[in-house]
């Protein structure tokens, strides 16, 4: 499924942040996700993004209008149309010269809001019992239940072994 840049890439960045380890370099994570931050992140901004990540996590665990509106209210979002770098007109939700953490917060909150409005069931968490990861369901049919093929495979193998043990026992 194709989403606009905020509903797709921004929501996927939110999932990456939630799935990141506490010691992961957030500047590198943003760069790997295609979000090119201008400048370096200060320790205060890193701390703020870690706090924000916990807020994003709550939306993946229980998506809904109220939690997402709460995220939006917490940002310094001021939507405007941008045409930078020769790109077609598109929306930005924070000033290009705003601090990195403020831009990421506005971007991810807007992305989750756009995704929720378009397809609320596509904000997900892995259904494997011991997996804490979250995801944005970009599958064609919108029925993804696991964060990865690996988790799906583990669940299927466990089910198969349980059935085989019952038949043998």
Image (cartoon, rainbow, N blue to C red):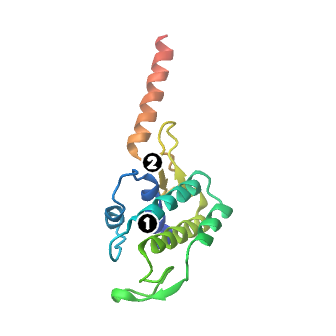
Q: Which residue is mark 2?
A: 147
Name the foreground residue: 26 vs 5.
26
Q: Is residue 155 visible?
A: yes
The number of numbered discs placed on residues in the rendered structure image is 2
Which quarter of the picture shows residue 161? top left
Place of residue 138 in the rendered image (x, y in percent of width and height, measured from the top left) = 46, 59
Residue at position x 58%, y 68% in the image:
113
- Residue 148 in the figure: left or right of residue 169: left
Seen in the picture, residue 95 relative to 74 is either above or below; the reply is below
Q: Regarding mark 2 in the picture, which secondary structure is present there?
A: loop
Residue at position x 48%, y 36% in the image:
130
* Other residues around mark 1 within 10 Å, as few (<14) / some (14–19) / many (≥20): few
Residue at position x 61%, y 57% in the image:
63
Nearest to viewer (mark 2 / mark 1): 1
Place of residue 155 in the rendered image (x, y in percent of width and height, measured from the top left) = 46, 34
Q: Regarding mark 1 in the picture, which secondary structure is present there?
A: helix
Q: Earlier in the sequence, mark 2 or mark 1?
A: 1
**Mark identifier at residue 44:** 1
Q: Contact, CB < 8 Å: mark 2 with mark 1?
A: no
Place of residue 26 in the rendered image (x, y in percent of width and height, measured from the top left) = 36, 61
């Amino acid at each position: 499924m194709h989403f606009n840049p905020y509903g797709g890439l921004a929501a996927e960045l939110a999932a990456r942040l939630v799935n990141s380890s506490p010691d992961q370099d957030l500047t590198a994570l943003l760069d790997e996700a295609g979000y090119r931050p201008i400048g370096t992140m200060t320790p205060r901004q890193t701390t703020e993004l870690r706090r924000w990540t916990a807020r994003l996590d709550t939306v993946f665990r229980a998506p809904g209008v109220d939690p997402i509106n709460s995220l939006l209210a917490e940002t310094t979002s001021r939507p405007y149309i941008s045409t930078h770098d020769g790109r077609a007109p598109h929306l930005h939700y924070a000033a290009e010269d705003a601090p990195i953490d403020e831009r990421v917060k506005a971007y991810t909150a807007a992305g989750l809001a756009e995704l929720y409005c378009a397809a609320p069931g596509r904000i997900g968490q892995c259904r494997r019992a011991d997996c804490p990861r979250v995801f944005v369901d970009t599958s064609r049919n919108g029925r993804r239940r696991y964060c990865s093929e690996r988790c799906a495979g583990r669940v299927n193998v466990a089910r198969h072994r349980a059935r085989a043990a019952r038949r043998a026992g």
